[in-house]
Structure formats: C-alpha cells, structure tokens
Amino acid sequence: MSATVMKSHSLMLTPTLRGLLWGLTAAVIWGGYLSFARAGITGGLAPLDFALLRYGTAALLVLPLLPRIGMRDLGGIGWGRGAVLALLAGPAFILLGTWGYRFAPLAHGAVVQPATVTIATMALAMLVLREQIARQRWIGVAIVIGGLALVSGAAMAQGEAWKGDLIFAAAGLLWALFTIASRRWKVDAWRATTAVAVIGGAAALPLWLAFGDGPALLAQGWRVIGTQALVQGALSGLLAVHAFGRAAALLGPARAAIFPAMVPALAVLAGIPVAGEWPEPVQWLGLATVLAGLPLAMGLWRPRA
C-alpha cells in the first residue's frame, strides 16, 4: 500500500467520531444561542421576533436549494411529515424556549430544557424505537444532571420561576419528539433541516405580521438584528439542526441525546463574553462533573465488573 493511501486511511474518521464531532458542533452553537436569546429578551426582543429571525433567515438561506431536492414531495420527506417535523422543531419550539425567559433566568433555561431533551429522548428511544440502554448509561445521565444542578448555582433557588421551568420543559419535550420522529422515519438530516426551515419560515412570517411589533424590532438597531439573525437563523436554525441530525443518524437518538445535556455548561461559558458573567466556583465544579459523566452516559466507557 502506498504512503498516500495509508495517509488517507489514517485521516478517515470512524462513524462514532464523526457523530461526536457533529454533536459537539450542535451543542456549542446551542450554548451560544441560549446566551444570545437571554440577552435579546432582556434587551427588549419578543419571542415572536426570535421566531421571525430564526426561521425567516433559515428559510431565505435554503429556499434557493429547495428545487434541487424536490418541492413536490419536500425532498422525499413528504409535506405531511415535514409539517410534523416543523411543528416539533419550528416556531413553537423557539416561542417556548424564549418565552420561558419572561419568568426565569438563563440558568433555568440552560438546565431544564436540555435536561428534558436528554431524559425524554432516551426514554422515548426505549419505548418507541426499542433501543436497549444499559444501566451504566442511566448512571452517567444522573451524574450529568447532578453537574447541571451545580452549574445552575443559586439561581435555581431564587424566586418562583416554576412557570418558566414548565415552559422550558415543554420546549425540551418538543425537541425530543423531533429527534425520535426523524429517526423513526429515517429522515436525512439535511432534508429535515430544510423542511423545518421552509415550513417554519412560512408559519413565522404571518404570525409576526399579525402579532409582532415592527417599530420595537427596528428600534433594536441593525447590529442587534443582524447578530441575532446570524445566531438564531444561520447557526442555530440551520447548522445546529443539521449537525444534531447527523449525530443522531451516526450515534442513534439515545446517544445523541446527551449533547443537549452539554448545553448548560457551554451556555455558562458563552455567558462570559456575551453577558460578561463569570461562573462561580460551584459552577466550575458542575462543569467538571458534567464532563466526567458524559463518557459513561454515552456508553463510551464501561466500568469493569
């Protein structure tokens, strides 16, 4: 075998490693998205503004590609299934995910929503897809959730934010159902992303025109609008959805479900440059706990008998 061929083989990534890289990409983007969403809500943006910026931007970016994948049947998905995927991961998801910040701080949204995604997806993978999940992986999930509780810090105990927590949990459940539906129907990650973007954009625009506040949105300034459109639409609405879909396809929904559990830690780190908030010592301990539990929760490491 030639040196060139050997080199090419050495650079090939296994499906598991590729799945990990895709999942990490999605998690990093979502961590930043939560920080920017919280900053946007406190700065005066409304949940409907986020729906418009996310799905309107995503739709504009993918519309030129739609004829290539097939408009008649939405690239083989079908408009019926595409509508279901958009219902689960479209405007309803972002409306709930940002509306919760009206009642609860960033720490709540960064913990409750991703934790719900992780637990609900693993449970649904067992019930719907009949996936076998070893006991040690549930132990790993428990370690991760314990770390998330430390990451949230004292903010979880401040006031009564139960309304926001319920809203965040509802958003997490929608994303878990989206993950299971995509896997059950064997929907290609890019086609699922396109379906959510196109149908979500078609739904978000009339909603915003009917109930949105144009002058208030324009008062935010084009820099804020452009930044949020980039973060919410191009990165979170397209790249992260596609990356998570690829991770779920390569690793399976149950394993991929652990990536949303990484989001709270990443959101705390993203809060340093975005919000100027440094983690407290207990939060750094939480970050370390999350990282320690992840390999066990994903089944990448098994304790010796």
Image (spheres, helix red, strand yellow):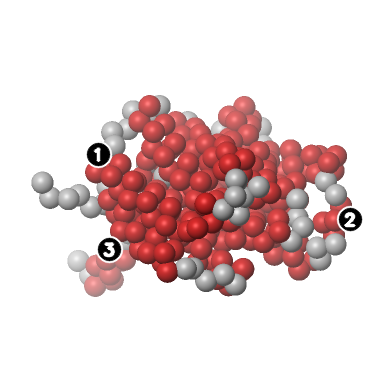
Left or right: where does residue 214 sit relative to residue 73? Answer: right
The x and y percentages for residue 88 are 59, 36
- The secondary element bearing badge 1 is classed as helix
Task: Residue lying at the far right in this picture: please name it.
Answer: 215
Q: Residues within 10 Å of mark 3 (few under 14, many from 20)?
A: few
Residue at 75% from the left image edge and 55% from the top image edge: 45
Front position in the image: 56 or 177? 177
Mark 3 — residue? 9
Front position in the image: 157 or 10? 157
Mark 1 — residue? 135
Mark 2 — residue? 215
- Real-space Cα separation, disc 3 to disc 2, in angstroms: 56 Å
Number of the label disc, if any, that sits on residue 53? none
Q: Quadrant of the N terminus?
A: bottom left
Residue at 83% from the left image edge and 46% from the top image edge: 212
Front position in the image: 75 or 135? 135
- The secondary element bearing badge 2 is classed as helix
In which image quadrant can residue 169 be found?
top right
- Pick whichever of labels 1 and 3 is earlier in the sequence: 3
Q: Nearer the viewer, mark 1 or mark 3?
A: 1
- The secondary element bearing badge 3 is classed as helix
Front position in the image: 145 or 85? 145
- Real-space Cα separation, disc 1 to disc 2, in angstroms: 54 Å
Task: Residue lying at the far left in this picture: please name it.
Answer: 305
Q: Please count the marks in the image.
A: 3
In which image quadrant can residue 84 be found?
top right
- Real-space Cα separation, disc 1 to disc 3, in angstroms: 35 Å
In the image, what residue type sits under mark 3? His
151 over 175 or under it: above or below: below
